[in-house]
Image (cartoon, helix red, strand yellow):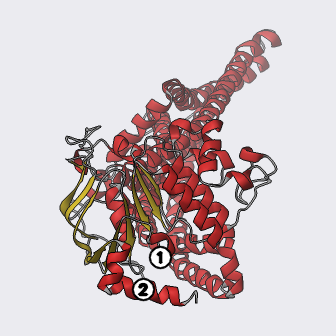
Amino acid sequence: MTPPPSPSPPHSPFSGFFSVFRYSRSALTLVWETSRWMMLGLALCTLVAGVLPAVAAWVGQLIVDGVVAAMESYQAASSPSLLETLTPVLGLVALEGLIIALIALAQRGLSAQQSLLRAMLGNKVNVMILEKAGTLSLGQFEDSELYDKLTRARREASTRPLALVNKTFGLLQNAISLASFGFLLVQFSPWALLILVAGALPVFLSEAKFSGDAFRLFRWRSPQARMQMYLETVLAREDSIKEVKLFGLEPLFLQRYRDIFNRLFVEERLLTLRRESWGFILGLLGTLTFYAAYGWVVVETIVGALTLGQMTMYLMVFKQGQGALSASLTAISGMYEDNLYLSNLYEYLEHPTDVEEGHLTQGVAPGDGLRFEHVSFSYPGGGEVLHDISLHLMPGSSLALVGENGSGKTTLIKLLTRLYHPTKGRILLDGSDLKSWDTQALRERVGVIFQDFVRYQLTVGENLGVGDTQAFEDEQRWQQAAHNGMADEFITRMPSGYQTQLGRWFKNGQELSGGQWQKVALSRAYMRKNADILVLDEPTAAMDAAAEAEVFARFREHSRDKMTILISHRFSTVRSAEHIVVIDQGHIIEQGTHESLLEDNGRYASLFHLQAEGYR
């Protein structure tokens, strides 16, 4: 398997290269917003570390020439005392020592501030990613392309902004050093600068080219890498390991994991070998140019055009200049690569979201209840899941939805909670379209338990508290909700009661049975005191018959003045609803009371008798 071809080249050979740097400003702004003082500190340390190496080289020349002059003066007949001879040279040595200490201090300052910024910025970017996730709709989360963007952003982008800023300051530092070195080298010969550039440029072009290849490989492999992450999760999570072991899936999934790695590694190995081979070959050019300049300076010194101190300075300046230029070009190449990866972050952050424009906190016809008017729904690129659904549920009434798995029952609930929007038709609450309602106000009125409810790795009380974030830590509300949901019976027997850690991810965590988890989820729905729409999607599938009967007895008691919607395959539960709707492949095929539907002798009656036969 090979990566797809690269995109068509831009008009100019370098326009694509330079256009990708548009994210540099965003990264600098991001770091500035994270900590202005640290960014100013980075700038100061960069300036010091950039200027002082050239100053140190110049002082080094003065020391060598001073030593030569002192030796000649001391050996002459009219020489002054040894102390007078040494004092100027030793002063220069002390000055160079001070300069070297300041350079070391600046480097330590850079290192310390970069380390602190790395932690702060990593957290800031991760928070930005999660905040953006909070604005995405359920449909967008189910879009595989957007999910790939999210995965790429989380894997790389949290470290790239600081890396880009570090390289930017490193480039600035090396540019300052180069300007200082260039000022000294041009006094030797302008050709020395040309040699300096010629030695470093080929490696730079090579690195830039392979950075782009590496980024394209990274994007191409995102779906496969996500499958690897999924297989890791399945093979190492307590909620899947039971089936993995019982069905003997370890060898199958591990082999698939290895196969994905092998496919990806072939491309990565080829890219790495090409990158390092060309880097070595082109790097030799830089070495050759340095030694050519080395020989030139030596010859000039031998013929008397340069002093010994000047020779020492020029060799040092040329060597350090070559290193600074190489580091600058490498930084530019790295900045190019960081910008490529930052495009993942900003593609994700700039992804358009569904704008919620609703502002209503109450409907225009209070007491009218819930209406579905000719509602249809289709997934993007798929067929209709619901077709022409019309229902009316008044306050204090109950509705049961019956149908085979995949008939559209749960999708109907997702439309009610505005996780999805109807493709056609509209849904009204108290006479106002759901689109006109404030999202928070709407969802405060709905208490829902989905059949795939979340088992939070939190304490028992917090597992209840998530049902109403305003009462997240209200223990009195926990206890009342647990009583209504019949969870208090087993919670009081747990080691730390409502403070008991649930799940196996953390120390001393307790695992619950399926039925106990369902009671926790049911209690979670009771946390919403303001909810006048209660939705139970298969709420007792894991409970025994006696527990189920008591759950619904309490449910009827607490929902007398509320609108209730029940999804269940158990007709002993369904028959208690005032109105029953039978859905088949997204269509309402029957509706009425339990008695009227039995009299009609249609699908409902057939399913009811089929289930009743199993209990005889």
Q: Earlier in the sequence, mark 2 or mark 1?
A: 1
Residue 503: give its label.
Answer: none
Q: Is residue 85 above or below residue 159?
A: above
Please name whichever residue, 585 or 29, is drawn nearer the observer in this view of the structure.
Answer: 585
Using a 10 Å C-alpha cutoff, classify the residue at mark 2 as few (fewer than 14 neighbours), some (14 to 19) or many (20 or more).
some
Q: Amino acid at mark 2?
A: Leu
> In x, y percent, where is residue 550?
60, 62
> In x, y percent, where is residue 391?
25, 63
**Residue drawn 58% across and 78% down?**
261
Q: Amino acid at mark 1?
A: Phe
Look at the numbered disc 2 and give the secondary structure of its residue. helix
Q: Is residue 348 left or right of residue 283?
A: left
List the residue tagged with mark 1. Answer: 571
Image quarter in which the C terminus is found? bottom right
> In x, y percent, where is residue 413?
37, 62
Please identify the quarter of the rendering in which residue 104 is found. top right
Image quarter in which the N terminus is found? bottom left
**Residue drawn 53% across and 65% down?**
539
**Residue 328 visible in the displayed image:** no
Callout 2–callout 1 Cβ contact below 8 Å: yes
Please name whichever residue, 90 or 209, is drawn nearer the observer in this view of the structure.
Answer: 209
**Residue drawn 61% across and 69% down?**
233
Please identify the quarter of the rendering in which residue 405 is found. bottom left
Q: Is residue 246 above or below residue 499?
A: below
Q: Is residue 247 left or right of residue 161?
A: right
List the residue tagged with mark 2. Answer: 607
Using a 10 Å C-alpha cutoff, classify the residue at mark 1 as few (fewer than 14 neighbours), some (14 to 19) or many (20 or more).
some
Look at the numbered disc 1 and give the secondary structure of its residue. helix
> In x, y percent, where is residue 301?
58, 40
Q: Is residue 397 above or below residue 431?
A: below
